[in-house]
Image: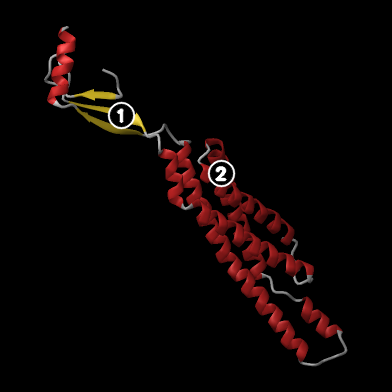
Amino acid sequence: MSDEEFVVEGLSPSQSPLVSVTFQRNQHRKEKYLEAEPKALGITQIGLSLFMMIGVSVFQAKGLSELPLDIPLIILSLLVVIAGLVAVSAQSLHLPTLRACLGMQIVACMVSVVNIIFTLIMLGSSFGGCWMYHWESTNTSTKYDVICRQIENIHSHFYAGGVLIQAALLAISVTLAAYCCKVVNCCGPAPKMPVVTVQTPSRVETDQSNTQD
């Protein structure tokens, strides 16, 4: 008897079993990936990453960032955008695309961890260029104080929100990677589902008569 089939005992070899249980591979296991809502999560990855990229680019363009972490953060966020695009395209359930999605989501997990560290560093650094310009200027109007405080508030609020965004991206990447891992069976063999076959007495008698003939 093979390891993929179990037949109810108690019958002679010439008789057909009333009930047989076979273990077969689940042909629809790829559809489990769709349970993760990859389209919604992938679009969320793309949207949040683009928001961070645009925000950091604006700070860099306006000279409101003093740390050399802007460019690496933008480049790493671009990788998360690519991961989101692959996650959306993997809805076709094409196995190579699902494997590519798994690889990109693992990369996105590592990228999100690094971006969290970068964002925390940038959150802890206060922007002081505005204050230096104020003291070097001959105009001592208080409007510069107001502008500087507004810039500092925007700076701190943006990067505080950026930490939450990167944490959300990390959670999304872990979720998609887990579902991809289940589908492509990278951690073990594909699971088998038990299939129970019940034969009617008339069918059993027919099988027996054919055997006797």
List x then y, in percent, for residue 14.
15, 12
Quadrant position of residue 132:
bottom right
Could you say whether the residue bearing mark 1 is in a helix, strand or loop?
strand
Residue 40 sits above or below residue 201 on the image: below
Query: The C terminus appears in which quarter of the rendering?
Result: top left
Could you say whether the residue bearing mark 2 is in a helix, strand or loop?
helix
Q: Is residue 147 visible?
A: yes
Which amino acid type is shown beneath numbered disc 2?
Answer: Cys
Q: CA distance from mark 2 to mark 1?
A: 29 Å
Which amino acid type is shown beneath numbered disc 1?
Answer: Phe
Quadrant position of residue 147:
bottom right
Q: Is residue 14 visible?
A: no
Residue 152 sits above or below residue 47 on the image: below
Q: Report the number of numbered marks.
A: 2
List x then y, in percent, for residue 162.
61, 66
Question: Which residue, given by chain and number where applicable, does mark 2 sit on?
Answer: 101
Name of the residue lying farthest toward the bottom = 141
Residue 56 sits above or below residue 18 on the image: below
Seen at 53% across and 61% down, the residue is: 168
Seen at 16% across and 17% down, the residue is: 206
- Foreground residue among 121 and 189: 189
List x then y, in percent, for residue 187.
45, 36
77 on left or right of 35 = right
2 on left or right of 49 = left
Quadrant position of residue 157:
bottom right
10 on left or right of 161 = left
Mark 1 Cα shell of 10 Å, populated few (<14), some (14-19), many (≥20): some
List x then y, in percent, for residue 113.
58, 55
Name of the residue lying farthest toward the right = 138
Seen at 55% across and 59% down, the residue is: 44
Question: Which residue, given by chain and number where applicable, does mark 1 sit on?
Answer: 23
Colour approach in the figure: secondary structure
